Amino acid sequence: MHVSAYAAQSATTPLVPFTAARREPRPDDVTIDIAYCGVCHSDLHQARNDWGNSKFPMVPGHEIIGRVTAVGTAVTRFAVGDQVGVGCMVDSCQQCASCSRGLEQYCEKGSTLTYNGVDRRDGLPTFGGYSERIVVNDKFVVKIPDGLDLAGAAPLLCAGITTWSPLRQWNIGHGNKVAVVGLGGLGHMALKLARALGAEVTLFTRSPDKEADARALGAHHVVLSTDSAQMKASARQFDLIIDTVPYAHDLNPYLPTLALDGTIVLVGYLGPLNPPVNSMLLIGGRKSVAGSAIGGIAETQEMLDFCGEHGITSDIEVIRMQDINAAYERMLKSDVKYRFVIDLASLRA
Ligand code: NAP
Ligand code: ZN
């Protein structure tokens, strides 16, 4: 089938209208009319080939919400009309040690990404959510709880799960102190989720004007990371720091703010650290630097159900598909409160 979409044709040109070829649905496929798609900083990294592995044309978008319009004969968990979501992955090997543990994001054979990937069965390129319709293996489709605003729920599929997974992995709850570095899409979800899990929450930001918002989003404390006196006053505090900054930056100033046995988990920047980490700051306090990628499908459903119970969605600015290039420029300036979400009705108009 052919669907209307927006695509990057190269790393240096704006996104433009594009007709994407999607496979005809298989017996285990769910066909989804996309209502909303969040705009992740990863979309921008990939469209501009920041990670060096981009394939063009590319239809970005992995925070997908919509309604089921058809199900294959082997699909039992979904029916026409269901409101569903699709995140960063659309398939995995389903057999390796990671997949067996529900950790499809760490599939030993490589999970199939929602876009800029290759379908494991037919070898065709995968195209993401900046489009009117998507066809996805039912194991990689999740249910959106009733009562959540659909546009606001879209960013849960990436920004939500990427921050939820480390909070759960490090058993964060009452009595823990958590800090978040960077108040963007991931950062604002980290504040909301850590707060809802019962932690005492701090935001590290470069942007003094974000303090009031940070508190409204759930932060008990806000520390200006460019102010060395404020950084010193935060020494030995945090059990977990979730670092969402998208570009290379100095981790060393954050290490003294970790408590004994504390961990800073990188979810934002992908690449060699520069400047290097000073191990002295880790050894004196048995501290760790870790990384984490999105979350598994079962964990994504767990996070969505938690958000349903607690009424948690993303704070969003809804845009038209046609405004995507301007949205990317604003994201580069950290000018987004706190996630752009595309209304795909604009593509059908
Ligand atoms: P975003 O909305 O653009 O937010 C990033 C925030 O980081 C900004 O708002 C800003 O916050 C801070 N920041 C930006 N540039 C900075 C710099 N040069 N130095 C220091 N701070 C800076 O981005 P996002 O959508 O949340 O994504 C964040 C990163 O996570 C991206 O690199 C994305 O690719 C990655 N990601 C990873 C995963 C995963 O599975 N690990 C999943 C999704 C996304 P302040 O103004 O508060 O300082
Ligand atoms: Zn993302």
Image: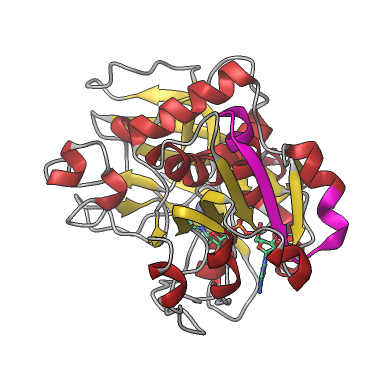
Q: Is residue 128 above or below residue 176?
A: below
Residue 35 in view of the camera: no
Q: In which quarter of the image is residue 263?
A: bottom left
- The foreground one among 227 and 104 is 227
Residue 210 is covered by the magenta coloring: yes
Q: Where is residue 107 in the image (x, y as percent from the top left)?
A: 22, 51
Residue 246 is covered by the magenta coloring: no
- The foreground one among 142 and 294 is 294
Q: Is residue 37 above or below residue 308?
A: below
Residue 162 in view of the camera: yes
**Residue at position x 57%, y 20% from top?**
308
Quadrant of the picture in which ligand 1 is shown: bottom right
Q: Is residue 152 shown left or right of residue 60?
A: right
**Residue at position x 72%, y 42% from top?**
219
What's the magenta region? 193-211
Q: Is residue 95 shown left or right of residue 16?
A: left
Q: Quadrant of the N terminus?
A: top left
Q: Where is residue 258 in the image (x, y as percent from the top left)?
A: 53, 57
**Residue at position x 86%, y 46% from top?**
212
